[in-house]
Amino acid sequence: MSKLKNIKWKQYIVYLVLVAVACYFGVFGLQQNLNRSTTILLEKAAVAMILAVSLNLVVGFLGELSLGHAGFMCVGAYLGAKTALALTAAMGPGNELLVLVICLLVGGVAAAACGVIIGLPALRLRGDYLAIVTLAFGEIVRSLFENLPDEMFGGSLGQQSVRYDRYQLFIIGFVLVILTLAVLQNLIRSKHGRAVTSIRDSEIAARACGINVTKYKLLVFTVSAFFAGIAGVLFSFTQNKVQPTTFDYNYSIEILVMVVLGGMGSLNGSLIAAVLITYLNEELQIVLTGDLAVLRGLLYALVMILLIIYRNAPALKGFREKWNMKRFIDRMRKHDPAKIHDDEAKWDRVPTKIMVDEVLSVDIQTSSPYTPDKRKKEED
């Protein structure tokens, strides 16, 4: 029981919420009682959460601006789809889960390799220069897959993929979200994570302390690219065909918006922002159809601007502190006055403390046995 009391349950609330959501919808999914729109929304939310928390590792904890996250996702999606077609033809039906696991490893490792290749020269840059290089990388990758011969990756028409069972895939997606969150949180709380955050706070001070800045930047970039590749593989299994237009720079900016909206350096905030933006996109696609579809981007941008202003405006700081979830939970709790104890450090209860006037009235004696008069007599 003592060990259970020492557990910091606040750190595991997000895991419990993700497990509860996966179990709740999983029960209906396994019974095939979920409609198509709900399963699609859950699949997209799982992909978005993996992308958001992985990019937050670079932008929020390392402090570098990257706009090529969709490029790593593109690598994972194309190679995962190609591998899935080959394995399905070789292994036959009935091995869908094994095929998915192998494709996740292939896509993640390929994206991580691209992260190393682009990270070695690019991470010597900083700020806007790094953002431009990563943005160019994402566009180069997308253009490369689009313009290769049709026999390799389908060309401009897209790569054929294997659609996983939609009643089970979102459960696997939430499991991957939990694994991604667990890996990144343990990395951040380790000594390597403290080194990464020290680089974000002051790169010069980190170098002066002996931290290998290039090594840790490359590590973070590689880990982030690995999970972006996993998200790309998961995305490919939600589609019958992977289109190159999906991974343009607008998608990278959308992932960055999730990170900024959720809070820089907040993994839980990135999860919430990813779900919120995914739901907002789905609702706008349903409401704005036909000629009104041109307003979708305008309303989306307007909502994002308002949310970011609310999240970061200094003038609204008092309102945010007064009306937040923590304050609401504290108000809902009913505190028992009998459980409120008096201050244990009160002056009349702690015998080691004395009043100030008593200090002034104490005669201070030297520890030496010789007083000035005795010392003078001995000298004489």
Image: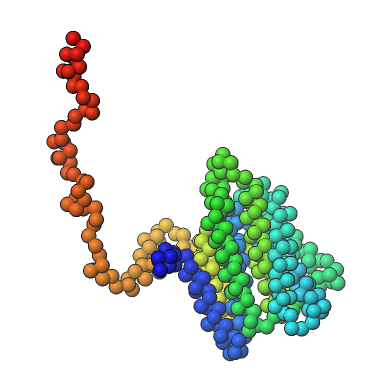
Q: How is the image coloured?
A: rainbow
Q: Is residue 289 visible?
A: no
Question: Residue 251 location, x and y as percent?
Answer: 64, 66
Q: Total number of numbered labels?
A: 0
Q: Is residue 75 left or right of residue 149?
A: left
Q: Position of residue 68 (x, y in %)?
A: 67, 60
Q: Position of residue 111 (x, y in %)?
A: 71, 62
- The quarter of the picture where the N terminus appears is bottom left
Measured as percent of width and height from the top left, residue 309 is found at 47, 62
The residue drawn where x is 72% and y is 63% is 109
Q: Residue at x 67, y 73 (%)?
A: 234
Viewer-proximal residue, 303 or 280? 280
Residue at 67% x, 46% y: name it.
124
- In the image, farthest residue toward the top: 380
Q: Is residue 375 visible?
A: yes
Q: Residue, x 55% and y 60% (percent of image)?
A: 186
Image: 349 above or below 159: above
What is the quadrant of the C terminus in the image? top left
